[in-house]
Amino acid sequence: MSLKRIGLKDFVIVQTLDLDLSAGFTVLTGETGAGKSILIDALQLALGERADAGSVREGAQRAEVSAEFDLTTATHAWLEEAGFESQDDVLLLRRTLDRQGKSRAWINGSAATASQLRELGDVLLDIHGQHAWQSLTRPASVLGLLDAYAGAHSTELGQRWQAWREAQRKLSEAQSSQEVLTRERERLSWQLGEIEKLSPKAQEWDDLQTQQQRLSHMQSLIEATEGASQALSDDDSGALAALHRAMQALQDQMAHEPEFEAMVQVLQSCIAQAEDVAHSAQSWLRHADLDPQRLAELDERMCLWMSLARRFRREPDELPAVWTQWQQELATLDEATDLNGLKTRCEQAEQAYRQEALRLRQLRHKAAPKLSATVTAAMQGLGLAGGVFEVQIQDLPQAQSSGLDEVIFLVAGHPGATPKPLGKVASGGELSRIALAIAVTTSQLGQASTLIFDEVDSGVGGAVAETVGRLLKQLGTDRQVLAVTHLPQVAACADQHLVVSKSVIEGHTLSSVHPVAGEQRVREIARMLGGERLSDTTLAHAKEMLGTAPASKKKARG
């Protein structure tokens, strides 16, 4: 099941309505002019159809329509992609319309656009009416139906089409701006040539500064280290000699004062550390070198860094990143100016697209005669005996995202007639029945879980009407089916029966909908058979149609 509830407030001639719907096959019946199609119109408004201020009930300021659906896998995926929240496995659509024609819409409580409602409606509902066949004249709809029947998924084709289009775009841009791209490439090549003389490495600028600072102060470093070494190691006045004398003096008196032992240990530690410092200073001095040549090299490289940084108006430490960026830009320009390479990629993308398009073409040509035969067979029981349905596939003059094929539905409504495009078949009743035959044939293929038929049985009766009823009942085993009908044979087949009636209250015409069952349903079927005056004959006939004739009961008791 999909559509669970529909609510109306001040819509056309409905003041308030809150209607629960069931699974299976549901019919809406009622007198002519009672407003049987109002529910269909309301659903279409809730699903994004153009709003008309005339839909607001006379005397009211605003009309409101709400529709509640089961949340299916397909609708859940749509909500996620569109950024709407899912609420307790329910999808709630709501739309309001005021007297000025201004409308507002919500999906699960969040504001939505009419285009979003229409897009979601394609997943939720498929409406067939006396003019619903018109969708079967639109190339995209027709091709989609055949592809679904053929199991020909076009996702891969669409991706290859986009890849081909992108390759064409790049080639076209390169061809039209070749001179500009060439100049830009030459400019980048020159800049890279200049910066490659330096070949700057990441963190190198910081290392150069550190080394240059050290070498430029080397003389001062040497003098400081020599001074420190002499202050520590001089035989007479050095710190080490003084520490040794102090330690010896305390050691000589340790026998008389035990506390001197701790002092001696401290002095021993100081002497050891001072000797380490003196050793390190001597070692550093042995390897110390003013190295004027290295200092000159550092100064020269730092000057080159500074020169390039000023020329390109960058900080010195930015040069490595700039170098990498320009290399990438040049590679992009090399590709853009490589017309031969771009042409090759474009040809490869086209070949990949056409390969997939030809694969789909084979599936379509294989499925077309099967669909033709199946729909033709369904037409025979719908008052179109001898009628023919034909799926014609033609080559498109130019490739499209959908492939290389144009699909046209041809129909002959009676024996001996030449099949013509569906849109040129004159009879509205024939068109409705053909649409019904196609809907029955392809009922397992579409993604919409609710099918609505608005007087598709117009112009038929008798055995054909019974066939229509059985077909709709059959559809109801797989999908939720709602049908507006004036035929008792169709209504008698329904799982749920809703009656639309109108009344005049305080000078205003109002319409209401209520479910009927049991004796009420018998009386409604009888009204449909014989008009407002119910006779024993029409009542008996209605009970027979519903399978509850008194005669059958008596026979069973006997």
Image (cartoon, rainbow, N blue to C red):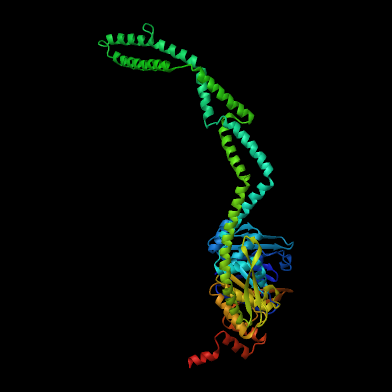
In which quadrant of the rendered view does residue 517 lie? bottom right
The one nearer the camera, 182 or 472, is 182
Check the image and name the residue furthest to the top. 236
Expressed as whole percent of the image width and height from the top left, the position of residue 464 reads: 62, 83
The one nearer the camera, 184 or 150, is 184
In which quadrant of the rendered view does residue 543 lie? bottom right
The one nearer the camera, 337 or 222, is 337
Expressed as whole percent of the image width and height from the top left, the position of residue 527 reads: 65, 84
Residue 494, placed above or below residue 6: below
Expressed as whole percent of the image width and height from the top left, the position of residue 62 reads: 70, 63
- In the picture provided, is 320 more to the left or to the right than 461? left
The one nearer the camera, 491 or 507, is 491
Check the image and name the residue furthest to the bottom. 558
Count how many numbered circles sit on residues in the image. 0
Expressed as whole percent of the image width and height from the top left, the position of residue 248 reads: 30, 9
Q: Quadrant of the N terminus?
A: bottom right
> Is any atom of residue 520 visible in this view?
no
Residue 314, placed above or below residue 229: below
- In the picture provided, is 535 more to the left or to the right than 495? right
Check the image and name the residue furthest to the front. 340
> Is any atom of residue 175 visible in this view?
yes
